[in-house]
Amino acid sequence: MRVLILSHDYPPQMFGGIGTFANNLANALSKKGVGVVVLAGCPPRPLKTGVIAARTTVNKNLEVIRVPRMDFPPSRIWYQLMNLNKIRHLVADFDIIHSQDQSAFPIIGLCKKNRPEIPWVVTMHSNPVPELYYSIRSVASLESSVRDVFTNLVGFPLSDLAIRTESKFADALVPVSEELRREIRDQYRVAERKLFTIHNGVNVAELESEARMNPLRGTYDDKVSILYAGRLYWSKGILHLLKSLFYLNVNLKFTNYQLRIFGEGPLRHKISSLVSRYHLEKNVKLEGFVAHPELIAAMAGSDIVCIPSLYEACPMVMIEAMILGKPVVAFNRPFSQELLSGIPNAPVARTIQDYAFQIHSLCTSENLRRKLGRRLREMTVKRFDVETMAERYIEVYHNLLP
């Protein structure tokens, strides 16, 4: 079996969960004997990764082809439009076409009309409807950035059309969470027979190997080390996290911690401004973008990982943190309820003040951190191992082949 994976985002040049998942899945499929070619979007200026080969043979079953795309919304569309002919020609050489998120629109319609017999699988990592809702909320809060608004508010009609087109032409849609499955089914009226829920998967052995590098513990051994990793967008909750830290400092009188923020995005200037306004300079450090191995090493050296997102489907960073045995703090959202199901007294918060209390409880009790981290690791390692996810995708592939 030969599978072509289309992904506008792919390591090591991009900072994002979709790319990390695509990489994990491609490697796991290739180890199980599936022939995989990844057509990976590469922005004009990769972030701190040096020279990236245009074509790389990873192993006998896996090849990565880098193609250009614009690093500006809608990046998924630029990826396809800039490589339209290449994608159309490649499709004929494969048994299965597997697209990540909206990297199948508009190309899926053209290819299915020319080669309807070739099955398409689309992994769905998000839903534009709740993203639109939170974009409107960000505008109302007067805290949004131009890119926030452009990506989710102005870009909604295109994202909505992409989901509708993929729902029409794809042979299988794979939402990465049960909640996302329900949203796609109900909002886009997708038949149950087309939907297969498979969570994001993590290469546990590779993750633990990267964690052992551990060069980024820093000089904060006398303080509790807190980590945030993600794009700096409003819906990721980074501003809510800073507000909770302000409450932690002022109302709970606790300052013996260091937050390290890994990521880039349009709110970086706003974040710097809030850090100054809230007098958090001694507690918050913006680290910017780092490659995935460095990020995981930093996570392994941290005590707590914060996931303050207002909307996610199945965040990779949260899964990675739990596999490493790190306690995570999240808001009470469907994604956090799903990932933390089965964990009694899991640290989920309903308000900014509650979020601060959850951080305070973990910061002031090493025993609580260890106990929660151990429970999370025990629950997560087998549940989210990418080897298991790869087997489930292979089942989906086989069910679609004649």
Image: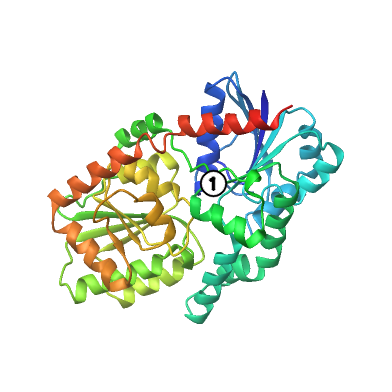
State the quadrant of the C terminus.
top right
Dividing the picture into quarters, in which one does residue 370 lie? top left
Tell me if 318 is positioned left or right of 117 in this view. Answer: left
**Viewer-proximal residue among 250 and 202:** 202
**Residue 149 image offset from top left, x and y in percent:** 59, 71
Q: How many marks?
A: 1
**Viewer-proximal residue among 16 and 192:** 192
Tell me if 212 is positioned left or right of 224 in this view. Answer: right
* Residue named by callout 1: 18
Furthest-right residue in view?
A: 114
**Residue 119 image offset from top left, x and y in percent:** 73, 36
Kind of residue sitting beneath label 1: Ile
**Residue 167 image offset from top left, x and y in percent:** 70, 51
- The chosen color scheme is rainbow
Instruction: Inspect this view and state whether residue 55 appears.
Output: no
Q: Secondary structure at mark 1?
A: helix
**Viewer-proximal residue among 390 and 257:** 390
Tell me if 271 is positioned left or right of 25 in this view. Answer: left
Task: Give the residue at x 57% y 33%.
Answer: 393
Instruction: Inspect this view and state whether residue 10 appears.
Output: yes
Task: Give the residue at x 67% y 23%.
Answer: 1
Task: Give the residue at x 65% y 54%.
Answer: 75
**Viewer-proximal residue among 326 and 249:** 326
Q: Is residue 7 above or below residue 33?
A: below
